[in-house]
Image (cartoon, rainbow, N blue to C red):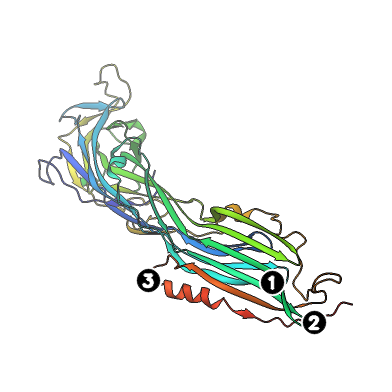
Amino acid sequence: MNKGMRSISAVALTGVAAASWAQTINVNTGSNTDVSFGSATQTAGPAPWSDLGVTATATIAPGDLQVATGGATAFTFVNAPSAGQTVGSGTTFNLNYTPGWSGSVSQGGASGSVTSSLVYNIGPISGSASLLNVGASSSASPTMDLGASLNSPAGAAVNTSGSGSGPGTTAAYTLSASGCVVVCVTVASASLGVTIGTQVQQSATVTPTVTYGDLVWISTSPLSKYSAGDPQAFIAGSGGSIVNPLGNLGSLGLTKGQTFYYNMLPEVALNVAVSGQAQLSLPASLTASYEVLGVGGSQSIPLGNLYTLSTGAQQTEYGTTFAASYYDSIKMSYEGASGNLTGQGGDEAIVDGPYAAQKLSGDPLPTGSGPCATTPVGCDLALPGGSGNLSGYGTQPGESSLIPNDQVPGGICVPAGSVNAGTCINKVVLTGGPLAAPELSAGTASSAATLLIGSLLVVRGGRTRKRIA
């Protein structure tokens, strides 16, 4: 019956004093749950080419989800028996219920980070340049109303979402490799351009399921205190009504004339299914033109998602049961098979007087299991993260090199018979820089620009010159 523990609610008895005969019992349904989602981290690249591409290490986690409920459900005893009435196994005691839920769902902003570098390995030209090393986040989701779903028999799902874009940057690089014999000549060169940004999206779905009913037990003790040892059952309602059967009195082991109490404690069971996910995308475009030892060309990759790291759907379920502080109790005397109910067989009883609204006391109510079993108000749930999953054109396997028959790094010399034959590469130059200021927040713009500018250095190779006869 229970997904979580019973929560004893404050009760208002409408139209009467609490110690008198009850007309309506209100079960308060206040709870507050915070769900934390785990992060996903992955590293990929370089892509799209094996000798020129972008690497990325990304981390992303959805924002915390807050689910709050409030309001109350009213339970009214609509066919209370009168004093002296004979009842038996065919008799039912009906409680009507009217839900009056309120509630809300809100989610904080997703958070993550990305570290990205341009990696190049074109003939004798190899190295890397930092592109991004920044945090990324989405906006918080707007607060959504949960009350309509809680009050609906179907319990429709309530969705939240948030998104954000940036930081990003655009940069260009010119690389050249020179060799010297008498004079120095350029034997390899490349111009590279890259635009890369970040986009964050997150979403969550909350689906509540509500069960209305009452806990029914029969006791023989005075004042009808709740006892875990008494015969009892949970009776679920439907369509606004709970039908409680009196059942077979002969199985209770009562003696003729013995007093017993038929007790009905209104309850509301809430179960909430939660699913949340976030993704961090790197929209990027690349252009390249090159010439290595007389072989030249150009290629470009239009703007598209180089990588998209998704946490995947993270799911959990929690619940609690709210119980009233008062319950309806009918005092009866066991009559056995008296035959007073025309057309009905079985054992019977006579109602001793009007039913009473009894203050709940006695043994503790049975507890449920699962998350929030002990803390329906202020419950914290934490979901573990995972490796996540990657998509985008930068994750495709078997990407070819940019340059056909690309040379491996090393001491490369112009072959014999060619212009400048015998000239060997002994210097690599990397120049260029950002074409536009990175689209960064004020707190991160200066550090990102420094990373980019700091990578534009002249690198002198330690290769020895070789002469070709």
Looking at the rendered image, the disc whose residue lies closer to the viewer, 1 or 2, is 2
Q: Which tag is nearer the camera, tag 1 or tag 3?
A: 1
Q: Which mark is residue 442?
A: 3
Q: Is residue 33 visible?
A: yes
Residue in view at x 17 percent, y 34 percent:
352
Q: What separation in Å lies between label 1 and label 3 (alpha carbons)?
A: 34 Å
Pointers 1 and 2 in contact (C-beta within 8 Å): no
Residue at screen point 34% across, 31% down: 250
Of labels 1 and 2, earlier in sequence is 1
Could you tell me the amino acid type at mark 3?
A: Ala
Does 455 sit left or right of 200 as displayed? right
Label 1 Cα neighbours within 10 Å, binned few <14 / some 14-19 / many ≥20: many
- Residue type marked 2: Arg
Left or right, 409 with respect to 105, comes to right
Image position, residue 82 (x, y; %): 15, 29
Q: Residues within 10 Å of mark 3 (few under 14, many from 20)?
A: few
| Towards the viewer: 192 or 105 | 192
- In this rendering, position of residue 125 left or right of residue 109: right
Residue 216's tag is: none
In the picture of the structure, the residue carrying the numbered disc 2 is 465
Q: Which residue is mark 1?
A: 125
Q: Earlier in the sequence, mark 3 or mark 2?
A: 3
Q: Position of residue 122 (x, y in %)?
A: 70, 67
Looking at the picture, does residue 402 appear above or below residue 261? below
Residue type at numbered disc 1? Ile
Residue shown at 69% from the left, 71% from the top: 125
Frontmost of labels 3 and 2 is 2
